[in-house]
Image (cartoon, rainbow, N blue to C red):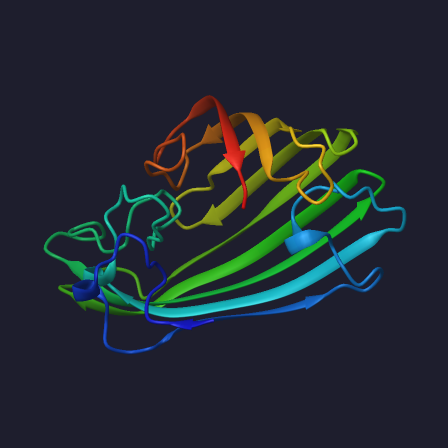
Amino acid sequence: MVGNNLSQLGVDAGQLGDTIDTFGAALVWLPTTGEYGPQGAYGDFEYHEDVATRVGLHYTHSTEDRESQPDAEDPENTQLRISDGNVIFTPGLFAPNSQIDEARYQMVSLDAGAKYRGFELAGEYYWRVIDDLQVRGSIPYDDFYDHGFQLLGSYMVLPKKLQAYTTYSRIYGEFGDPWDLGVGVNYFFSGKSGFERQLRLNVEYLYLSDSPVGNFAVPYVVGGNGGVIHASLEFFF
């Protein structure tokens, strides 16, 4: 992928820079069955009779400035945040009378997963650095570094109808170590071949500890602590 900003939604043309310096790349290996379900979707909806496996390596790079950031509450926005959820371009965040105007974002992640007879176990680990800071004033940081992981386990309780899953993720950062735990179910309505995934009901419980993200598109806020119960009816096409 090649572009000019980490986020396209919530950013108008006047906010975009005049350089193409955002890019991402992925290398994916499917060593056993040569596939991992349609679009590599979570869960063994297809009920693999042979073990399907996947390993992926990903890299993202972008130079971001404070003018090109979407509003903090825009849905699907991509903000450069530290591990306590604060946006790095916030005036005076790291020292009085200071502000970061530009920064370089780089992230590497490694993922792996396996599917077999309705079960899936998948995980991902990432490493992220934000450096090359262009600062007005002075701050006591040359860069920001964090790393973390997520795990997902699921099982098709009723083949092609009912899926149960659990998730866990944690970030290890300079400004806190937030984590979350989730359990939920997906119910798929359609029984028509080729359209089984299109309409589903999701019900989920999340427990958040110092949530580092949040906006109007998700049922939690930055810094949130405690439980969240939410449900959604989704139509995929």
**Residue at the location (72% across, 32% down)?**
191
Against 11, residue 150 (above or below) is above
Residue 1: % across, % down: 47, 71
Q: Which residue lies furthest to the right in this view?
A: 49
Near-viewer residue (93 or 222): 222
Position of residue 118 measured from the top left corner of the image (x, y, whole percent): 80, 38
Query: Picture coordinates of residue 159 (x, y %)?
Result: 79, 32
Q: Nearer the viewer, residue 203 or 99?
A: 203
Judge left or right: residue 139 versus residue 160. left
Residue 130 picture location, percent across and down: 37, 63
Using the image as rendered, state which of residue 131 and residue 234 is in the foreground: 234
The structure residue drawn at horizontal position 76% and vertical position 63%, both measured from the top left corner, is 30
Q: Is residue 89 above or below residue 86?
A: below
Whether residue 124 sits left or right of residue 206 in the image: it is: right
Furthest-left residue in this view: 97
Please tell me which residue lies in front, 92 or 17: 17
Task: Give residue 201's quadrant in the image.
Answer: top right
